[in-house]
Amino acid sequence: MDALASPHDEAVVRLLYEEAASLDERRWDDWLALFEPDAEYWIPAWDSEDEHTRDPQSEVSLMYYPDRTGLEDRVFRICTGKSAASTPLPRTCHMISNIRIDPADGGARRVRTHWTTHLFRNREVTGYFGRAEYLLARRPDGWGIRRKMTLVLNDRIDTVSTSTASERGSACWRFARSIPASADWRSPMYRPRRHPAPERCCCG
């Protein structure tokens, strides 16, 4: 349906824009206030090139919080400098498009959007894009976010994804064959290296 079909839907659009602006302007308390106390916040991982995980309870997620306390903890770590991945904080620009609003049970709204986030940090410009789905609950003064699922379409680790799985497997096999049978596997020399997770914009 048309995103501006009714005054209620105009309020939905304003909520989406306010969420983006509060993140860009680092108004963390205002951002948290948009979520219901029992709000579920989920960023699925990609299970394959074309399919993402479907169940945050049993499958891998990039981020999953069953209620708002997880978001509150994340904001606390950002504000106190305890989030290494968000230090220093990037300058961000969250853009929203293709807003589609549909009615849901109990007077709620289901919303689907496309989004793009531009980041600038340490003199480097990066960006992410994807889709998001919301379930919004009615409030006396408007709407609150009951559930948000964000799908990141370009979430990838370049150092891993630039080679095929068979190439990585062959490299691991060659490495294993090069290790002497008497080697001490507890030695740091033979411990696997973990590729760092890609940097993302804080929170959103």
Image: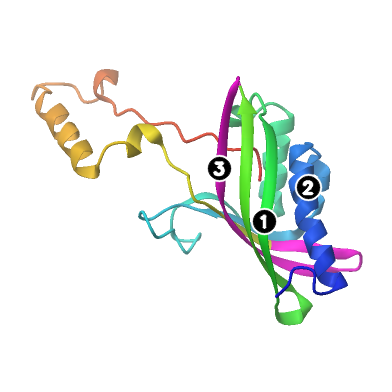
In this rendering, the label closer to the viewer, 1 or 3: 1
> What mark, if any, has residue 163 been given in the picture?
none
State the quadrant of the N terminus: bottom right
Magenta residues, start to end:
122-146
Q: Residue at x 56, y 47 (%)?
A: 129
On screen, residue 24 versus residue 177, left or right, reads right
- Establish if 12 lies above or below 49: below
Q: Distance between the residues labelled 2 and 1?
A: 19 Å
Q: Which residue lies furthest to the right in this view?
A: 141
* Mark 3 crowdedness (10 Å alpha carbons): few <14, some 14-19, many ≥20: some
Three-letter amino acid code of the residue under disc 3: Tyr
Q: Is residue 134 magenta?
A: yes
User: Quick check: marks 2 and 1 in contact, CB under 8 Å?
Assistant: no
Residue beneath disc 1: 97
Residue corresponding to mark 2: 31
Which residue does the image show at 19% across and 43% down from the upper left?
A: 166
Secondary structure state at the residue bearing disc 1: strand
Q: Which amino acid does label 1 sit on?
A: Ser
Q: Residue at x 32, y 36 (%)?
A: 162
The one of 92 and 104 positioned closer to us in this rendering: 92
Secondary structure under tag 2 reads helix
Q: Is 22 contained in the magenta span?
A: no
Q: Tell me the mark number nearer the camera, choosing from 3 and 2.
A: 3
Look at the numbered disc 3 and give the secondary structure of its residue.
strand
Q: How far apart are marks 3 and 2 (CA)?
A: 20 Å
Q: Where is residue 191 in the image (x, y as percent from the top left)?
A: 28, 26
* Residue toward you, 178 or 154: 154
- Residue 128 has which mark? 3
Q: From the viewer's perspective, is residue 57 above or below residue 17?
A: below
Horizontal placement of 49 versus 199: left or right? left
